[in-house]
């Protein structure tokens, strides 16, 4: 059985009061396994609470990472982060983007008995609501909360088969009154994130919340670190963008593209692994261990076909595995790049993940590493003539 809580965290959680739990695990090791700098980056990113419009903790990590690389960092008016590394090329402007936010909840109402009613921020399945731990981002700091549920000994037949609507959800912070909840610093409008510690599974796979899209943010930072460390010369003028409010309708990307003014763009996302019981190739086609993915269709865009095929060519030349995914019910920020100004070539590349928009998703490290490799190989090749060729529809 996998232990998921460190002893100090257990002790603090047992108090059931206001907690300093921004980071459920606190060291660069998990279950006695030393984390390398990339895994530790993933630990910090996934454990940071950051539902849509409440991304401060994630933004702080992203800014610190790009600052450490000597980047020029700027912000647009919705809070997306724009970073340019020193030595940036002066060729085509390439927007590489992933989103800061994760799905979560917002405090709607606190009842007289001290239970908290919520609205959702982003798409959670009803199955993911009850019997979970959450972080409420209150004004006095984060507060651990539990989503209650009927007790099995007295549940009715209907309750036993119920899939929860968000209107059924209530959070319990152990309080006995509205006043007690308010004294914890909790008010209507506060953001709420899933709470789940980063865990290394026995075979080396990683489990965490928020892979969508902290894994994309981690790919960007890992690629930027390598470009700086190895002094990789890129022909393009790369702007690394961490967008806000993707999960509630690609809102941050709409202003981010206006600021970035890209000639071409790459969105990096958590892909839909369809390699477990109850899901199959009719829903999605990625699997853990198959390498990064490229969306050929999603509900927000059909990617530029030349750019899409370019990824497959580069992957083959570089010996990097690459999977394709055709799916609906999934929108992503690449669509906002595609519709910027008069239109731009863009694609959505992914690291496959199981159980998106839930408390515990699973990824495989080799898929992540290959995604970083592929991104760098693509960026190496995006010079002016390549980008104008990929962007041209002129049949003459
Ligand atoms: Zn996403």
Image (cartoon, grey):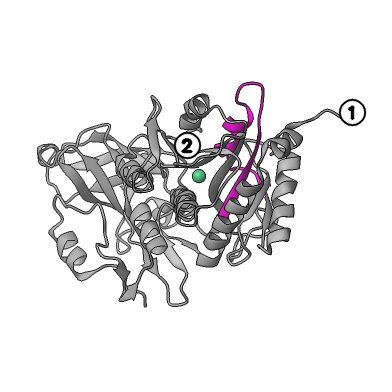
Indicate which label's residue lies in the foreground, 1 or 2: 1
Q: Is 124 within the magenta?
A: no
Q: Residues within 10 Å of mark 2 (few under 14, many from 20)?
A: many
Indicate the position of residue 264 as horizontal and vertical percent values: 63, 35
Look at the image and tell me whether residue 163 can be seen: no
In the displayed orientation, state which residue is furthest to the top: 341
In the drawing, does residue 129 fall left or right of residue 190? right
- The disc, 1 or 2, on the residue closer to the chain's N-terminal end is 2
In the rendering, which numbered label is found on residue 166? none
Do the CB atoms of the residues marked 1 and 2 lie less than 8 Å apart? Answer: no
Residue 108 spot, x, y in % from top left: 29, 33
How packed mark 1 is, by other alpha carbons closer than 10 Å (few <14, some 14-19, many 20 or more), is few
Q: Which residues are magenta?
A: 326-351
Instruction: Establish whether ligand 1 lies closer than 8 Å to the Cβ of label 2.
Output: yes
In the visual, does 346 lie left or right of 168? right
Q: Which mark is residue 246?
A: 2
Q: Which quadrant would residue 331 be assigned to in this image? A: top right
**Residue 332 sits inside the magenta stretch:** yes
Q: Quadrant location of the C terminus?
A: top right
Q: Residue at x 56, y 48 (%)?
A: 233
Horizontal arrangement in the rendering, residue 319 relative to residue 190 (left or right): right
Secondary structure beneath label 1:
loop
Q: Please say if 264 is above or below 364.
A: above
CA gap, disc 1 to disc 2? 38 Å
Disc 2 on helix, strand or loop? loop
Quarter of the image for the N terminus: give it.
bottom left
Residue tagged by mark 1?
396
């Amino acid at each position: 059985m996998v232990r998921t809580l460190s002893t100090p965290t257990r002790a603090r959680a047992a108090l059931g009061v206001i907690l300093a739990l921004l980071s459920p695990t606190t060291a660069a090791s998990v279950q006695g396994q030393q984390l390398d700098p990339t895994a530790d980056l993933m630990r910090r990113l996934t454990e940071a609470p950051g539902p849509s419009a409440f991304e401060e903790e994630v933004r702080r990590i992203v800014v610190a990472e790009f600052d450490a690389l000597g980047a020029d960092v700027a912000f647009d008016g919705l809070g997306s982060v724009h970073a340019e590394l020193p030595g940036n090329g002066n060729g085509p402007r390439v927007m590489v983007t992933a989103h800061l936010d994760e799905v979560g909840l917002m405090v709607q109402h606190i009842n007289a008995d001290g239970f908290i009613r919520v609205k959702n921020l982003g798409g959670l399945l009803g199955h993911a609501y009850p019997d979970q731990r959450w972080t409420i981002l209150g004004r006095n700091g984060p507060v651990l909360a539990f989503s209650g549920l009927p007790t099995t000994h007295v549940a009715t037949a209907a309750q036993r088969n119920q899939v929860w609507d968000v209107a059924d959800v209530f959070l319990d912070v152990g309080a006995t009154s509205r006043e007690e909840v308010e004294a914890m610093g909790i008010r209507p409008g506060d953001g709420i994130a899933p709470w789940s510690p980063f865990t290394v599974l026995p075979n080396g796979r990683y489990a965490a919340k928020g892979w969508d899209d902290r894994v994309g943010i981690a790919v960007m930072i890992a690629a930027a670190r390598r470009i700086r460390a190895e002094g990789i010369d890129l022909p393009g003028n790369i702007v690394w963008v961490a967008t806000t409010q993707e999960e509630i309708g690609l809102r941050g990307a709409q202003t981010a593209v206006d600021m970035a003014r890209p000639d071409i763009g790459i969105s990096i996302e958590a892909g839909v692994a369809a390699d477990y019981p109850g899901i199959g190739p009719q829903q999605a086609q990625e699997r853990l261990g198959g390498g990064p993915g490229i969306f050929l269709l999603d509900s927000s865009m059909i990617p530029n076909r030349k750019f899409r095929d370019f990824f497959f060519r580069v992957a083959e030349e570089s010996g990097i595995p690459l999977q394709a995914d055709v799916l609906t019910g999934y929108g992503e920020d690449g669509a906002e790049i595609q519709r910027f100004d008069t239109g731009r070539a863009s694609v959505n590349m992914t690291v496959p993940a199981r159980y998106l928009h839930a408390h515990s998703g699973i990824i495989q490290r080799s898929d992540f590493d290959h995604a970083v490799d592929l991104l760098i190989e693509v960026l190496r090749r995006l010079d002016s003539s390549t980008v104008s060729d990929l962007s041209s529809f002129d049949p003459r």
